Each structure stands twice: as C-alpha cells, then as structure tokens.
Amino acid sequence: MWRMGMAAAMVGLLLVGCNFHVSGPSNNPALNRVAEENFRDLAREEDDRVLARMSSANSRETVKAALPTLREIIGPTIPGSAVRTEGQIIKVTDGTVYVVVQTFSLSDRYAYVTTRFIPENRVWKIQGCHINIERKAPASVTPPSEGATET
C-alpha cells in the first residue's frame, strides 16, 4: 500500500516539475509601449528597429524575410495607439515571459497583435509576434436617389 502512495507522489512531483507554470494578470506599461512601437515600426518599414528588439534566439535573417509579409497583412495604414491592451506575466520552468495582447483599429480592419517578451541579459527582448486581422464591416451603401441615371 505504501508503494502505491510513494509511486503516486513521485509521479505527481515529476508532472509538477515538467509542466510547472504560474500566470496571472499583470501590466507592464513600459513593455506595452515597446510592443506598440514595434507594431508601428513594422508598418513604417523600420526594419532595423524591429530587428533590434528581437531576441537573439530568433534568426535575424528569418525575421527579416518575414517582415514584408507581415506588412502586407497589416495593410497601408500606419497604426495609432492601441485601443485595448492586456498584459500577462507567465512563470514557467525555464524562466519568465511577458505576453501583451493589443488591439489596433486600422482604416479598414482591426489588428490583434500578441507580442511575447523574454528576458535576455537583464533586458526584455521580443521572442515572437503574432498578428491576426479582422476586416471591418463595409460602410452602409446609400442607394442612388430616385430618378438618377447611370452613365
């Protein structure tokens, strides 16, 4: 009987050690601003600034090659300030990450941007950025006035 108890305790410790993470709401205004600036710099084609914020864990060449595609997703509008920002600190077995999710209202779409930061040499660096786009509903179409003719 005691063997089953010991085995259960060992399995429990093993699972806790492998999958330990703690998360909670958090707000880091400085990192939120960095994420916002990064999104704007991406849209403005300020690639050197974007690349400077990236973690060394990322291949510089791979990130640089992906930037034009991300700009195409964003569209021609230079984003203003985020209309919504939520941050979360996550502690995992191999360190701490900060994740910020921001919503930007662009001319014809909404951009939902998730930026993940990791500490690197006592400085927070961007590990990754995910952009999801949702098109805004088209403006209501005004029917032509009666008697108008098309040319």
Image: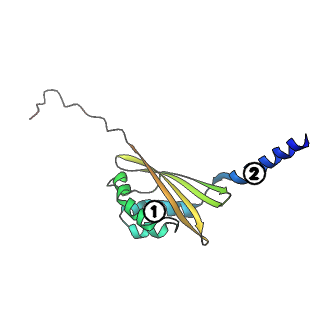
Would you say 148 lies left or right of 71 here? left
Identity of the residue drawn at 73% across and 54% down:
17
Q: Earlier in the sequence, mark 1 or mark 2?
A: 2
Tell me if label 1 and label 2 are in contact, CB under 8 Å.
no
For this orientation, the residue located farthest to the left is 151
Q: Secondary structure at mark 2?
A: helix
- Front residue of 64 and 52: 64
- Front residue of 62 and 77: 62
For this orientation, the residue located farthest to the right is 2
Instruction: Tell me if mark 1 has few (under 14), some (14-19) or many (20+) residues whose alpha carbon lies within 10 angstroms of its own.
Output: many
Tell me which colouring the rendered structure shows: rainbow
Would you say 129 lies left or right of 29 here? left
- Front residue of 104 and 133: 133
Instruction: Tell me if mark 2 has few (under 14), some (14-19) or many (20+) residues whose alpha carbon lies within 10 angstroms of its own.
Output: few
The N terminus is located in which quarter?
top right
* Residue 134 in sight from this viewpoint: yes
Residue linked to disc 2:
14
The C terminus is located in which quarter?
top left
Identity of the residue drawn at 46% across and 66% down:
59
Query: What is the three-letter code of the residue carrying label 1?
Result: Asn
Residue linked to disc 1:
38
In this rendering, the count of numbered labels is 2
* Residue 20 in sight from this viewpoint: no
Residues under labels 1 and 2: Cα distance? 39 Å
Query: What is the three-letter code of the residue carrying label 2?
Result: Leu
Image coordinates of residue 116 in percent, x first then y, are 54, 58
Query: Taking 151 as reference, is 99 above or below it?
Result: below
Image quadrant in which you'd find residue 98 = bottom right
Image coordinates of residue 29 in percent, x first then y, are 57, 61
Q: Secondary structure at mark 1?
A: helix
- Front residue of 83 and 112: 112
Identity of the residue drawn at 36% across and 58% down:
78
